Image (cartoon, rainbow, N blue to C red):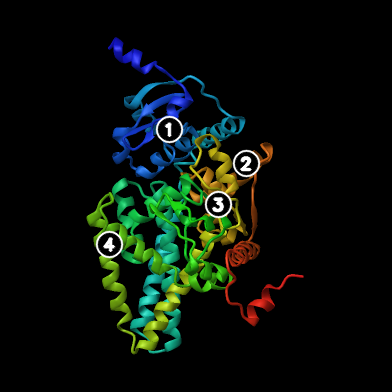
């Protein structure tokens, strides 16, 4: 017992902490205490990626952001010492106080009725869309039904997004059922894939090599830093900037919206690839069963349409409408600052604010954006139900102002202009790398300077 206490009181420097940043030897620090979480890596409910991304660092702010108070009681078993040179920045102090205040007010536990309303709306959309296919012979109504199906996928996506951050139902089991139903069964997207991808995104927002939401080579590149063919730490492969990617990127501000109209295909593919891989996927059987259910009912429904023209039109309409959600994801991050390298635990707050962009909209449009219009607030307080985001937005903005940090927002239209502008700037830079690409008169007319 005495030896154990001595071990727990061991003083550890930040330099020593940094050395323990491998899967086989992984330490982290939380509020000045150092924990050896090597054996916890494969059991971490949030997956191994967040721990690996912040290994060997102080992770207090990110821990506070992503974990409920109940998680603190599990830490003692991993305790090995104290950080001798532990320091807290002024912005981190204020941030932690704000999280504590929200917790005291019970905001993290009061979820409102948004999930129930969204589920009912999703059910209504499903009934109307299916009825339009089965009980109408109008080609126009069939296309409209396809659009409603795409809108259904958007709404089910908001439920899946919420459920990945906090318990949306009264129990863990019921929340899991809703996740698989709305994600896997209704939308064909593995909730396991989404959580893995999304956790990586949140912990390393707008890191070009760690954030998968910015890794769209060869089709898109939002920064010339990607032209160095950097390695994706998420996909564990090199993102080659070659002749093919250079060609696509050179025209990316033209292809952005058309690609977003069929971006759903990418999510389908990534879900299937993960489920068939040897990577750890919790409840893999449930995940596969849900995705299989989607690929049974959706093609079966499409088969009731009278000809291939209407079938293709239905599918394209559903994909194009849900493309609005994919555009929204891009608007929230493409116009923001990017960087290359590991996320840093000690400037976590700063990275979250500089890497996110809000969409200004009236309260009656909140349902449409699913909470992502308050992207800054969502990234700072990911466990906070979206019904509270508008209320606490002034507090987040004031905190950013106090510490001279970026707080970026614009209208939906302006955010689109900013995003296309970022893509266009990178496209023009790509064209200047190496030998010139073949040009045409339309390109010259649109992109002439001076």
Q: Residue furthest left?
A: 285
Count of number-bearing discs:
4
Relative image position of residue 308 (x, y in whole percent): 35, 87
Residue named by callout 1:
56
Mark 4 element type: helix
Task: Name the residue at 33% across, 27% down.
Answer: 78
SS under mark 3 = helix
Q: Which residue is mark 4?
A: 290
Quadrant in the picture for the C terminus? bottom right
Contact, CB < 8 Å: mark 3 with mark 1? no
Identify which residue is drawn at 38% across, 52% down.
236
**Label 2 belongs to which residue?**
395
Is residue 46 visible in the rendered structure shown here? no
**Label placed on residue 47:** none
Question: Mark 4 or 2 closer to N-term?
Answer: 4
- Look at mark 3 in the image and give the residue it sits on: 375
Front: mark 1 or 4: 1
Identify the secondary structure beneath mark 1. loop
Q: Quadrant of residue 255?
A: bottom right
Position in image of residue 300 (x %, y %):
28, 77
């Amino acid at each position: 017992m005495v030896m154990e206490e001595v071990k727990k009181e061991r003083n550890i420097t930040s330099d020593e902490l940094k050395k323990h940043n491998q899967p086989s030897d992984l330490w982290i620090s939380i509020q000045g205490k150092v924990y050896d979480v090597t054996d916890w890596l494969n059991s971490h409910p949030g997956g191994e990626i967040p721990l690996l991304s912040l290994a060997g660092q102080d992770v207090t702010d990110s821990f506070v952001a992503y974990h409920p108070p109940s998680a603190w009681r599990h830490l003692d078993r991993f305790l090995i010492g104290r950080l001798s040179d532990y320091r807290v920045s002024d912005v981190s102090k204020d941030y932690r106080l704000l999280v504590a205040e929200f917790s005291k007010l019970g905001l993290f536990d009061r979820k409102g009725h948004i999930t129930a309303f969204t589920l009912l709306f999703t059910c209504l959309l499903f009934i109307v869309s299916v009825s339009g296919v089965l009980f109408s012979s109008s080609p126009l109504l069939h296309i409209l039904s396809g659009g409603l199906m795409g809108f259904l996928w958007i709404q089910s996506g908001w439920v899946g997004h919420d459920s990945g951050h906090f318990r949306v139902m009264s129990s863990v089991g019921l929340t899991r059922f809703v996740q698989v139903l709305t994600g896997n069964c209704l939308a064909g997207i593995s909730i396991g894939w989404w959580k893995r991808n999304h956790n990586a995104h949140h912990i390393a927002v707008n890191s070009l090599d760690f954030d998968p939401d910015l890794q769209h080579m060869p089709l898109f590149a939002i920064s010339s830093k990607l032209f160095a063919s950097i390695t994706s730490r998420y996909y564990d492969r090199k993102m080659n900037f070659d002749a093919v990617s250079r060609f696509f990127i050179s025209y990316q501000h033209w292809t952005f919206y058309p690609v977003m109209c069929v971006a759903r295909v990418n999510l389908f593919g990534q879900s299937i690839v993960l489920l068939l891989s040897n990577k750890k996927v919790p409840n893999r059987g449930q995940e596969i069963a849900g995705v299989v259910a989607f690929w049974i009912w959706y093609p079966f429904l499409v088969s009731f349409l009278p000809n291939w023209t209407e079938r293709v039109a239905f599918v394209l309409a559903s994909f194009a409408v849900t493309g609005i959600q994919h555009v929204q994801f891009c608007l929230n991050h493409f116009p923001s600052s990017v960087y290359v390298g590991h996320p840093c635990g000690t400037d976590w707050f700063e990275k979250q604010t500089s890497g996110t962009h809000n969409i200004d909209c009236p309260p009656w449009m909140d349902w449409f954006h699913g909470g992502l219009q308050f992207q800054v607030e969502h990234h700072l307080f990911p466990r906070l139900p979206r019904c509270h985001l508008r209320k606490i937005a002034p507090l987040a903005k004031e905190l950013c102002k106090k510490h001279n940090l970026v707080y970026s927002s614009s209208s939906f239209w302006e955010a689109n202009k900013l995003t296309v502008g970022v893509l266009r700037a990178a496209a023009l830079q790509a064209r200047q790398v190496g030998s010139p690409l073949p040009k045409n008169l339309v390109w010259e007319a649109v992109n002439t300077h001076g």
